[in-house]
Amino acid sequence: MIETRWDPLTRKLPSLVDPKFGMSVYVQSLLNMITSDSEASCTVPDHLQLPNKTTPDNCVPHTDCCDEDSLRRLKVDAIDLFYQHRVDPQVPIEDVAEAVKDLIREGKVKHFGLSEPGVQTIRRAHEVQPVTAVQSEYSLWWRRRPEEELLPMLEELGIGLVPFSPLGKGFLTGNIDSKTTFDTSDFRNIVPRFTPEARKANLALVDLLRKVAERKKKTTPAQIALAWLLAQKPWIVPIPGTRKLERLEENIGAVAVELTSEDLREIDSAASKITIQGARYPEYLEKRTGL
Ligand SMILES: NC(=O)c1ccc[n+]([C@@H]2O[C@H](COP(=O)([O-])OP(=O)(O)OC[C@H]3O[C@@H](n4cnc5c(N)ncnc54)[C@H](OP(=O)(O)O)[C@@H]3O)[C@@H](O)[C@H]2O)c1
């Protein structure tokens, strides 16, 4: 159960978490709090980065990352899941894993996570300190690359996948079309997949989600997109983002949506006939992933 009394003014977080869905929402929020409210972490989440930032945002974690004051401010004894948010090619991943291992030994961190790492990086890190979760983009409109290499390797090593942007940055919810305009600060303005022409073509995928949702009754395209992810593997835990409580509730409702094997076959077959237009990132940002 997620306790939905999140208060945007005090930024109070849910204190009870659904192991299937809420855990990473909680952890994500914690890490966002660390980076926005204090100097306690050396990682910067994407939504706080400037779109033209080109330097890696990681350093080797050190004990200051999780000092007593930081943990006290967070009102926790230890951080449940500590992610390296972007792999820094200048820093051997073994050094990062070793540093996180120290934090775990000191009891300040419970689990180690990596964000958008390459498969070899995961293997090397995992040898030093077992990786619990990998955050990477995975959704109905970004499948081929994760399914080819990443998912089989995570299954082999017993690592959970936390798909970010599981709603295609909002597109898969059906709330966006080719005429939608975004605030000037919105990241989607620089994403090739969000040009009006690409959106027009990609709406075919939303039509499919809408069709399945209508048949299921009282179900939305966003819920189908999330239920599809949840149906792929029991160790996949998507983290949809929203600033609205009613959407948080709608998205959590995806846990109760059951897709039959026939539904899944239909979605897979129809989706495979749709060629998604536009890259998911501008080229300079894509280069910072999979390292
Ligand atoms: N590790 C990484 O490199 C990385 C990269 C990107 C994102 N992330 C994390 O992943 C999480 C989610 O990703 P994301 O925000 O990029 O994409 P997302 O979850 O796919 O989509 C979020 C967008 O969808 C809208 N939305 C959410 N639920 C909706 C609903 N039920 N109906 C209609 N619209 C809905 C939101 O708008 P409103 O806010 O207006 O509801 C927002 O614009 C965040 O926690 C983010 O920090 C991590």
Image: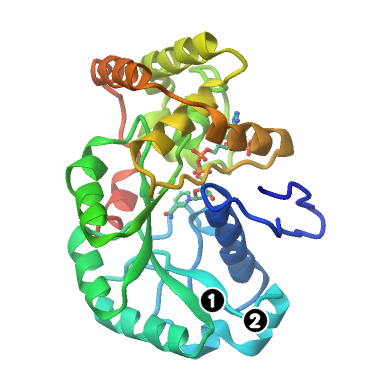
User: Looking at the image, is 187 positioned above or below residue 116?
Assistant: above
Residue 121, x across and y down, in percent:
22, 67
x and y, in percent, of residue 234 in the image: 38, 45
Q: Residues within 10 Å of mark 2 (few under 14, many from 20)?
A: many
Is residue 60 visible in the rendered structure shown here?
no
Residue at 56 percent of width and 74 percent of height = 79
For ligand 1, the image quadrant comes to: top right
Q: Which mark is drawn over residue 70?
A: 2
Quick check: is the Cβ at mark 2 less than 8 Å away from ligand 1?
no
Which residue is found at the position 37% from the left and 17% from the top? 263
- Who is closer to the viewer here, 35 or 282? 35
Q: Is residue 193 left or right of residue 82?
A: left
Quarter where residue 245 is shown: top right
Colour scheme in the image? rainbow
> Of circles 2 and 1, which is in front?
2
- Left or right of 237 in this view: 125: left
The structure residue drawn at horizontal position 33% and vertical position 16%, both measured from the top left corner, is 262
Give how far across and how far down residue 183 sits, in percent.
61, 36
Crowd class of label 1 (few under 14; some 14 to 19; many from 20; radius 10 Å): many
Mark number, residue 41: 1
- Kind of residue sitting beneath label 2: Ser
Task: Report the amino acid beneath label 1.
Answer: Ser
For the question of whether residue 241 can be seen, the reply is yes
Secondary structure of residue under mark 1: loop
Q: Tell me if 75 is positioned left or right of 173 in this view.
A: right
- Quarter of the image with the C terminus in it: bottom left
Give 243 or 133, whichever is nearer the viewer.
133
